[in-house]
Image: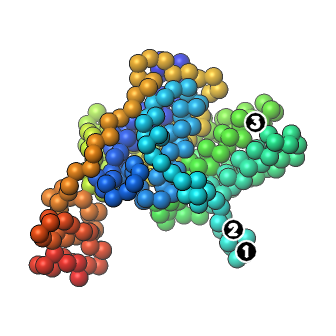
């Protein structure tokens, strides 16, 4: 932890970020897109969401690690707005279900309004919304959960929501002058960090013992840990990129102000290999989808779970 002056959250963020890159960056299908993508992320908002997490880590721990990933991951502003905008239909349609990330975005919006207008009413509203969300979505051990879908109904998007909430709590903390109120949020973040490390992490000496999924095909780099499950309460079950992003968001949120990275690895950037042609022999498809190869170009496609590949290389 010396690299970050003994800050546990920064140290865990660094290890988690490196494992994230080793296991899921770049994607074997990166050549299909005009910007860098990650293995298992879709080509839209999920790739944008991880960029903010990496950038926040640079800012809070004062380093330039993964700068090439940020600079080469061109994203139009419209795409980012689409990624982070709350669903307006929740109110319009009278829906009773709201997600933690939506509350987080509103908390950060109140914090921004306070910065602009210096009206403490915005801080009061942010505090009430943030703490009520934490209270409602915490289990008996005071560990944060996504009540609307956990333990077993969260899709890939939903696995990222808790981390996005924690990220926005940190934005709120950055402007909150009341230290007594700030302390309860720092404690909440730290308690979740410590619980995550103790009960929901796989970082075995033989990392192959950890159950890790690779949706788009095998990784370019050697697999690495630590990896985390989507359930912050634990125990660890499976590592995948979405919950890894959520864990990274939590660790970055817990970095103490004034933390500075020191040493030769503070400007590390991974090599980004050019895309390579793949065949079914590369095992590019999810386990429940049959790979279907067709000639004369030795191209392939992944059949849907309900399809099979016929002798002509067509999913039917």
For disc 1, the marked residue is 92
Q: Which residue is mark 2?
A: 88
Bin the neighbour count of mark 3 within 10 Å (Cα to Cα): few under 14, some 14-19, many 20 and up.
some
Q: Which image quarter holds the C terminus?
A: bottom left
Q: Which mark is residue 19?
A: none
Spot occupied by residue 277 in the image (x, y as percentages of width and height):
20, 55
Q: Residue at x 51, y 57 (%)?
A: 45
Between the residue at mark 2 and the residue at mark 1, the CA separation in whole angstroms equals 7 Å
- Residue extending farthest to the bottom is 316
Vertical placement of residue 111 versus 33, above or below: above
| Above or below, comparing residue 194 to residue 211 in the picture | above
Distance Cα–Cα, label 2 vs label 3: 27 Å
Question: Dividing the picture into quarters, in which one does residue 220 lie?
Answer: top left
> Residue sitting at 16 percent across and 75 percent down?
313
Whether label 2 touches label 3, CB < 8 Å: no
As drawn, is 29 to the left or to the right of 253? left
Q: Residue at point 44% right, 26% down? A: 267
Of helix, strand and loop, which one carries label 3? Answer: loop
**Image point 87% across, 46% down: which residue?**
121
Secondary structure beneath dot 1 equals helix
Q: CA distance from mark 1 to mark 3?
A: 31 Å
Q: Dot 2: within a 10 Å radius of its alpha carbon, few (fewer than 14), some, or many (20 or more) residues? A: few
Is residue 209 shown to the viewer in this render? Answer: no
Q: Nearer the viewer, residue 285 or 184?
A: 285
Residue 300: x and y in percent read 21, 67
Coordinates of residue 204 in the picture (x, y in percent): 32, 36
> Viewer-proximal residue, 166 or 33?
33
Give the vertical position of 289 relative to 49 (above or below): below
Disc number at residue 175? Answer: 3
112 or 170, nearer to the observer? 112
């Amino acid at each position: 932890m010396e690299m970050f002056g003994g800050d546990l959250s920064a140290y865990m963020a660094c290890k988690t970020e490196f494992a994230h890159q080793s296991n899921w960056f770049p994607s074997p299908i990166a050549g299909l897109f005009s910007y860098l993508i990650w293995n298992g992320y879709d080509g839209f908002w999920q790739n944008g969401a991880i960029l903010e997490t990496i950038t926040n880590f640079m800012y809070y721990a004062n380093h330039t690690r993964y700068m090439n990933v940020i600079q080469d991951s061109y994203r139009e502003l419209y795409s980012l707005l689409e990624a982070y905008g709350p669903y307006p239909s929740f109110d319009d349609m009278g829906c009773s279900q709201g997600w933690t990330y939506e509350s987080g975005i509103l908390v950060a919006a109140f914090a921004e309004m306070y910065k602009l207008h210096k009206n403490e009413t915005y801080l009061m509203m942010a505090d009430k919304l943030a703490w009520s969300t934490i209270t409602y979505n915490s289990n008996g051990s005071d560990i944060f959960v996504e009540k609307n879908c956990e333990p077993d109904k969260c899709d890939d998007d939903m696995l990222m929501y808790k981390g996005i909430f924690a990220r926005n709590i940190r934005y709120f903390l950055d402007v909150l002058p009341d230290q007594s109120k700030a302390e309860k949020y720092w404690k909440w973040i730290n308690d979740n960090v410590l619980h995550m490390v103790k009960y929901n992490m796989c970082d075995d000496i033989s990392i192959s013992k950890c159950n890790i999924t690779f949706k788009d095909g095998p990784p370019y780099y050697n697999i690495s840990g630590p990896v985390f499950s989507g359930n912050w309460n634990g125990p660890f079950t499976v590592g995948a990129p979405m919950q890894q992003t959520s864990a990274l968001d939590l660790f970055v949120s817990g970095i103490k102000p004034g933390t500075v990275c020191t040493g030769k690895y503070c400007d590390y950037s991974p090599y980004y290999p050019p895309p390579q042609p793949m065949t079914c022999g590369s095992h590019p498809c999810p386990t429940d989808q049959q790979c279907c190869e067709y000639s004369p170009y030795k191209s392939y496609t992944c059949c849907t779970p309900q399809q099979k590949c016929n002798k002509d290389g067509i999913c039917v």
